[in-house]
Amino acid sequence: MNKPSLSSLCKRLDYQFDDSSLLEEALTHRSAGASNNERLEFLGDSVLNFVIAHELFKMFPRLREGDLSRLRASLVNGESLAEIARELDLGDFIKLGAGELRSGGHRRSSILADCVESLIGAVYCDSNFERCRELILRLYKNKLQNIPDLQSLKDPKTRLQELLQARKHALPQYEVTHVSGKAHDQLFEVSCHINEPAITTSAKGRSRRKAEQLAAEAAITKLQHAFEQEQHD
Ligand code: MN
């Protein structure tokens, strides 16, 4: 496969490297040699998290720490970084070892995501914080303009807890009612009980946590229904 030239990548990044060896290093996966992008990835991860944290901090002056963390996690994660990598066709530029190359490593999300981080680290080393921040904001432009709804980022157990707390009701109780299957393939059955209004739901899942989330989800549906009834009474 003929690799497209690095200058076309720089064009897409809208950044020209003074030291092109940093760019090469950022694009070299650990399968391709001892001098690889892991150190730059480590650095880039940190700068990226800081820059996005600061953006969210400025954008949402009233949000609390937990919600800011949740928003940041929704923006900075393996999947969103892989998406950014695919928009840049980064896979075409990554240098992989023979094994990774054969198994299609240049399409793997984790490799792509790490490479975005290492590129960020490389730009930081090649220039300065401000230029690096500009790059991050370019890469994240769409995502920062389309911040997801906070409520949708919360898991069902958290949402259920907040619904009950808002009405000063007691918190739900979860109980494992049944476990079946062999050690590596267990199925958990969990009940979720609310005192007021009296609601019990149950759900099954491959982990206790998963089952609890499903039971909470079912309880939210019942609870909302009960609250609607209250309003009509
Ligand atoms: Mn990483």
Image (tube, grey):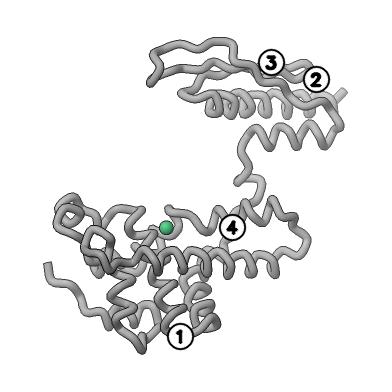
**Disc 3 from disc 2: Cα separation:** 10 Å
Amino acid at pointer 3 = Thr
Contact between marks 3 and 1 (CB within 8 A): the answer is no
CA gap, disc 3 and disc 1: 59 Å
- Mark 3, residue position: 200
Amino acid under disc 4: Arg
Query: Regarding mark 4 in the picture, which secondary structure is present there?
Result: helix
Q: Secondary structure at mark 2?
A: loop
- Callout 3: SS: strand
In the displayed structure, 160 sits above or below 68; it is above
Q: Residue at x 49, y 78 (%)?
A: 132
Name the N-terminal-most of marks 3 and 1: 1
Residue 184 pos. (x, y %): 38, 21
Q: Is residue 122 shown above or below 227? A: below
Label 4: which residue?
72
Instruction: Kindly identify the amino acid type of the residue bearing the numbered disc 2.
Output: Pro
Q: Residue at x 40, y 83 (%)?
A: 15
The residue located at (48%, 54%) in the rendering is 77
Name the front one of labels 3 and 1: 1
Give the quarter of the image for residue 96. Answer: bottom left
Q: Nearer the viewer, residue 120 or 83?
A: 120
In the picture of the structure, the residue carrying the numbered disc 1 is 127
Around disc 2, counting alpha carbons within 10 Å, would you say few (fewer than 14), some (14 to 19), or many (20 or more)? some
Mark nearer the viewer, 1 or 2: 1
